[in-house]
Amino acid sequence: MSEFFDEVDEEVRRDQLKRLWDRYSLFIIAVALLIIAAVGGWRAYQYVEGQKAAEAGSAFNKAVELSDQGKHAEAEKAFADLAARAPAGYRMLARFRQAAEVATRDKQAAVKLYDELAADRSIGAGQQALARLRAAGLLVDTAGYQDIKQRLEGEAGPGAAFRHAARELLALSAWHANDAAAARQWLDMIALDGETPPGLRSRAEALQALLPPVAKS
């Protein structure tokens, strides 16, 4: 008797499934096709992006080779092309390298490119800080101390990633401006920071020796 009821239940289930299939089969097939299409599209997208990254990497390396060979005009053009069309990671690197190549012929034009990077929030705070540092490095011998201070003071605080280089540039700028007090302020920060690199510490000590002695009260 139990076998009979089992067969009846099985028949009922088959009928229910058939009715469900008849009612929703087109929807189920459509969903399945959409999933297959989405997976296929994603795989195709990954392949295309991988190809783009590989091509950009090859082009970037060739541009670096041009720079190493002293072919700065050609390297500048190659990096500019990459900055315009490469995937995001290579595009950012190319913009930095383009600015460096421009600096070999026109420091002010390079500063403008670095300033554009510093203002671009899409590249991340660390890269923005590096751009500010690079621009200040090009300007330290010609720009006023207040200009350099405005650019770098925020990068010179405790814990800042580029604080050591920023403090050195600020000290140099103050020294060029004959502002001994300001130069001494940054040199003291260099001296008191236990993480200051040895080479930078030595340069700071040498610059400190060039400053006039502190007036006794």
Image (cartoon, rainbow, N blue to C red):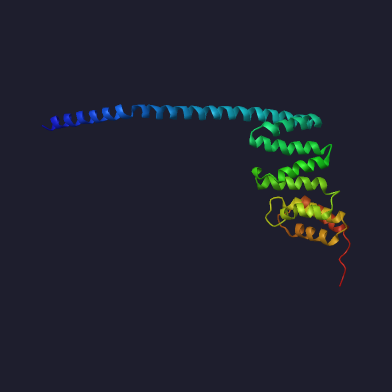
Report which quarter residue 55 is drawn in: top right
Position above or below: 169 against 33: below
Residue 71 in the image: x percent, y percent? 81, 30
Residue 190 in the image: x percent, y percent? 76, 57
Q: Quadrant of the N terminus?
A: top left
Report whether 113 appears left or right of 89.
Answer: right
Position above or below: 97 against 193: above
Residue 201 seen: no
The residue shown at (75%, 36%) is 98
Report whether 44 appears left or right of 197.
Answer: left
The residue shown at (76%, 41%) is 113
- Residue furthest to the bottom in view is 217
Report whether 74 appears left or right of 160.
Answer: right
Position above or below: 92 against 186: above
Residue 15 in the image: x percent, y percent? 23, 28
The residue shown at (74%, 30%) is 78
Residue 162 seen: yes
Depth check: give the residue in front, 117 or 65.
Answer: 117
Q: Quadrant of the C terminus?
A: bottom right
Residue 54 in the image: x percent, y percent? 63, 28
